[in-house]
Amino acid sequence: MKRIKWKNLIVLIMLISSLLVILHDTYYLTLYSFITGKIYSFTWYGLITFILAFLIGGASYEYLKDK
């Protein structure tokens, strides 16, 4: 029986949560704006979290790819 590598599991959870943040923000900036007719944009906090999601997601992906 194989042991669970907890570090890899945590990195996978970080990757999935980063992807969810990216998808959520992209949805609200594109499709939701088109459906409701209201224009939404980033706040500074939203822009920083969007960029951080890309950085964390990229680092998590590279870490899991190397393992």
Image (tube, rainbow, N blue to C red):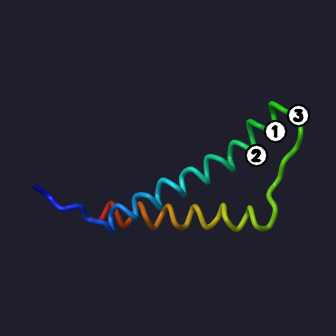
Determine the residue positioned at 43% across, 64% down.
60
Determine the residue positioned at 81% across, 34% down.
34
Tally of numbered discs: 3
| SS type, badge 1 | helix
Q: Name the quadrant containing residue 33.
A: top right
User: x, y percentage for residue 4?
Assistant: 23, 61
Determine the residue positioned at 36% across, 67% down.
63
Q: Are marks 2 and 1 in contact (CB under 8 Å)?
A: yes
| SS type, badge 2 | helix
Which residue lies under the disc numbered 1? 33
Q: Is residue 20 above or below residue 4?
A: above
Q: Amino acid at mark 3?
A: Gly
Q: Amino acid at mark 1?
A: Ser
Which residue lies under the disc numbered 3? 37
Q: CA distance from mark 2 to mark 3?
A: 11 Å
Q: Is residue 59 left or right of residue 47?
A: left
> What quarter of the picture does the C terminus occupy?
bottom left
Q: Residues within 10 Å of mark 2 (few under 14, many from 20)?
A: some
Q: Name the quadrant containing residue 43.
A: bottom right
Q: Amino acid at mark 2?
A: Leu
